[in-house]
Amino acid sequence: MAKKTLRLAFFLTLIILAAGLTGGILANSLALLSDAGHIVTDLFALGMAWFAAAQAERPSDERRTFGYHRVGILVAFLNAVLLIGIAIFICYEAVQRVQHPEVVQPLIMFVAAGIAIGVNLFIAFGLQKEDHNLNIRAASLHVIGDIGASIGVVIAGIIILLTGWTIVDPILSVGIAVLVAFSAWRLLRETMEILLESTPRSICMTDLVKDMQLVEGVKDVHDLHVWSITSDMNALSCHVMIDNLPPSASSPILNSLTMLLKDRYQIGHTTIQFECSTVRQSACCEGLYCRMEVPKETQCEHDHVHS
């Protein structure tokens, strides 16, 4: 579904780009040309998002056991960086236009911006259904930013038509740039958190440990890590202390933990190591999120259980 939506959005954006470039040149409007420049990044973003959605459908293999889901995150990260660069360029061009004002044709601005608004609204409605995916959200931000920019172009055209204040055109361009940069920064921060394998913002580690400790048979939890493979796929690994039980007797504990993590915390991939007492902290990798004090006794049987 996501792939088809992105493909349609890509080709519709080509129409918007043609209208924006033609209108910007004919109207001599920096705001419209800036918007067209933003549309070029829209086109790139949608094309890369389309590619990433196709890659995400590829099955995992021996080299990439989690599949190709991170392709979408990498694309979203590159889109955010590109958008920030575009915003800086627009601000530079706006300063040049303020210093050297030029005649602008507001009527042509209306037509070009109107076409862009109509088509982008249609695209945004389609992408909204898939907004849980960061890659789709990245593409949506481009489109939403373009709608705002096009509305601004229409307003600027009205002001220029009524007052002749052509300085409104470059001032609007700066406003567009700020809008683009703000959206890009939020996206950049979210993708960086996933690439750095940070704990998802929706998960409180303290609450997670408390809930796991309430499961019957669980003595304590330590060496706990939660991260996102992609925006809608979370994973967890941890050590869980239980009584010295054989694997068959510990299965109900594992099932209860797995259901808790899936239903309450939306963690679908879990790796849980059962142990009857914790290993010494010196055996842990430095910097890991260890939750327990090391007990005096160190003898232990280990079960590595995956779900």
Image (cartoon, rainbow, N blue to C red):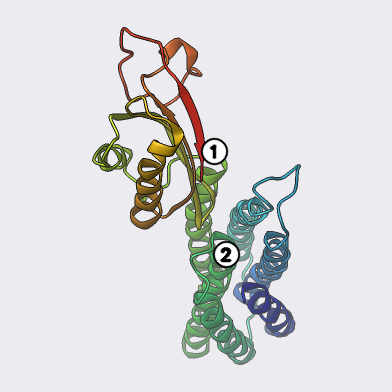
x and y percent of residue 85 in the render? 63, 53
x and y percent of residue 80 in the render? 59, 55
Amino acid residing under circle 1:
Leu
Instruction: Kindly identify which residue carries mark 2.
Output: 98
* Residue at x 50% of width, y 76% of height: 128
- In the rendered image, the vertical position of residue 16 relative to residue 252, given as above or below: below
x and y percent of residue 127 in the render? 55, 76
Element under disc 1: loop
Instruction: Kindly identify which residue carries mark 1.
Output: 196
Question: From where the camera sits, is residue 28 visible?
Answer: no
Q: Which mark is residue 31?
A: none
* Residue at x 39% of width, y 10% of height: 298
Q: CA distance from mark 2 to mark 1?
A: 42 Å
The label nearer to you, 2 versus 1, is 1
* Residue at x 62% of width, y 89% of height: 115
Q: Residues within 10 Å of mark 2 (few under 14, many from 20)?
A: some
Q: Quadrant of residue 98?
A: bottom right
Element under disc 2: helix
